[in-house]
Image: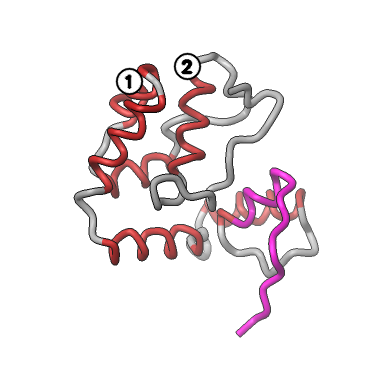
Amino acid sequence: MDLTKSYPRSVREKHLGLVQVARTIDKGNASLEGKLGEYKYDCPMDVHLFEFLGLKGNDVLEAIKKGSTATDQIFQNAISKKSAADIEKFNREWLEYGPAAGSDGEKYFLELRGQVAPDRTDVTAWADLLDLDEKRPVARRVPA
């Protein structure tokens, strides 16, 4: 996968029932090929996924080296230890996750949002911002 010429899959795209997995695999493949571009494998978003599943980035990367069967196996084994409710909660919370108010992360988030979609003040989650940055459609949110 060449992430200097294309985007990884969306955070939203589920693989084996879990968000972030497909994107992480894409970045792992690109890392192994030396074609990560501006992306980072084992970034904080990947680490959050690994922590939820009890995995280590290097172990996942070793599985990716062996191919898709080994990659799916390492993820399936970890996912099988989670309840359906835990997976649903992780998926929901991960797609809604945004930076903490007043944090450096929020400052970066707002700067990036200002560059890619200054009119989209409804975008408050990282998944939405990444999709916008990667030219994917994001539904407008109506304030509650």
Q: Residue tagged by mark 2?
A: 32
Q: Main secondary structure of the magenta part?
A: loop
Identify the residue at the far right of this view: 119
Tell me which corner region of the image, top left, top right, bottom left or bottom right, holds residue 76. Answer: top left
The answer to whether the residues at label 2 and label 1 have Cβ atoms under 8 Å apart is no
Where does the image place residue 129, in percent across and percent down from the top left? 64, 54
Number of callouts in the render? 2
Secondary structure beneath dot 2 equals helix
Residue at the spot 23% in from the left edge and 40% down from the top edge: 77
Of the 4 image quadrants, the one containing the C terminus is bottom right
Q: Which residues are magenta?
A: 128-144
Q: Which amino acid is tagged 1?
A: Glu
Q: Nearer the viewer, residue 63 or 126?
A: 63
Kindly indicate the quadrant of the structure image that contains residue 140.
bottom right
Who's the residue at 35% across and 34% down the image? 72
**Residue 114: in magenta span:** no
Whichever of labels 2 and 1 marks the residue nearer the N terminus, that label is 2
Q: Quadrant of residue 117?
A: bottom right
Above/below status of 134 relative to 98:
above
Q: CA distance from mark 2 to mark 1?
A: 10 Å
Q: Could you tell me residue 40's position as x and y percent?
A: 51, 30
Measured from the top left, where is residue 57 in percent x and y? 34, 30
Q: Is residue 103 left or right of residue 58?
A: right
Q: What residue is at 36 percent from the left and 45 percent from the top?
A: 49
Look at the image and say whether residue 131 sits in the magenta stretch. Answer: yes
- The amino acid marked with disc number 2 is Leu
Position of residue 115 relative to residue 36, above or below, is below
Colour scheme: secondary structure
Name the residue beneath numbered marker 1: 62
Residue 126 in the image, given as x and y percentages of width and height: 56, 54
Q: Residue at 41%, 32% (x, y): give it.
A: 42
